[in-house]
Amino acid sequence: MPVNRTIRLWSTAALFASALALGSCSTQIADMPGIGLPADAPERPKEAGGYLPVHDLPPDRNEEAMKPAELAKIQAELTAARDRQATATTAPQKPAKK
């Protein structure tokens, strides 16, 4: 085995061993009272929580989210803002004075 390959093998092994050692220390450091969590943090649950209820849908609304008049007003405001922006970008800009 050439010397260069041997050095690379030993340095890779040392890097891997140090990564494992530092990784195992981090779990112990996270549980220390002064370092890991702040004093006012809530306690961790004893058992891991279940899956989030992603398929539970909220109940249907009794009334509309927005009345048609409000919707038309907001759409008109957005259209006016879009038109103002379009004319502002097409207008020639004056160079800044130094």
Image (cartoon, rainbow, N blue to C red):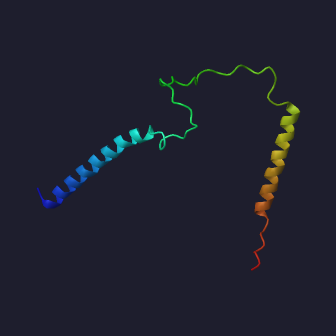
Tell me which corner region of the image, top left, top right, bottom left or bottom right, holds residue 87: bottom right
Q: Is residue 40 left or right of residue 2?
A: right
Q: Residue at x 51, y 24 (%)?
A: 49
Q: Residue furthest bottom?
A: 98
Percent across and percent down for residue 78 are 81, 46
Horizontal side of residue 9 vs 97, given as left or right: left
Figure check: 56 above or below 87: above
State which quarter of the image contains the C terminus: bottom right
Foreground: 88 or 40? 40
Q: Position of residue 16 (x, y in %)?
A: 28, 47
Most extreme residue toward the right is: 69
Quadrant (top left/top right/bottom left/bottom right) for the N terminus? bottom left
Q: State left or right for residue 67 relative to residue 39.
A: right
Measuring 85% from the left and 30% from the top, which residue is drawn there? 67
Instruction: Report x, y in % for residue 65.
Output: 79, 28
Q: Vertical placement of 14 versus 39: above or below?
A: below
Q: Position of residue 37 (x, y in %)?
A: 51, 40
Q: Which residue sits at x=17%, y=60%?
A: 4
The foreground one among 75 and 41 is: 41
Name the quadrant containing residue 56: top right
Give left or right: position of 74 versus 47: right
Q: Nearer the viewer, residue 22 or 57?
A: 22
Identify which residue is drawn at 34% across, 46% down: 22
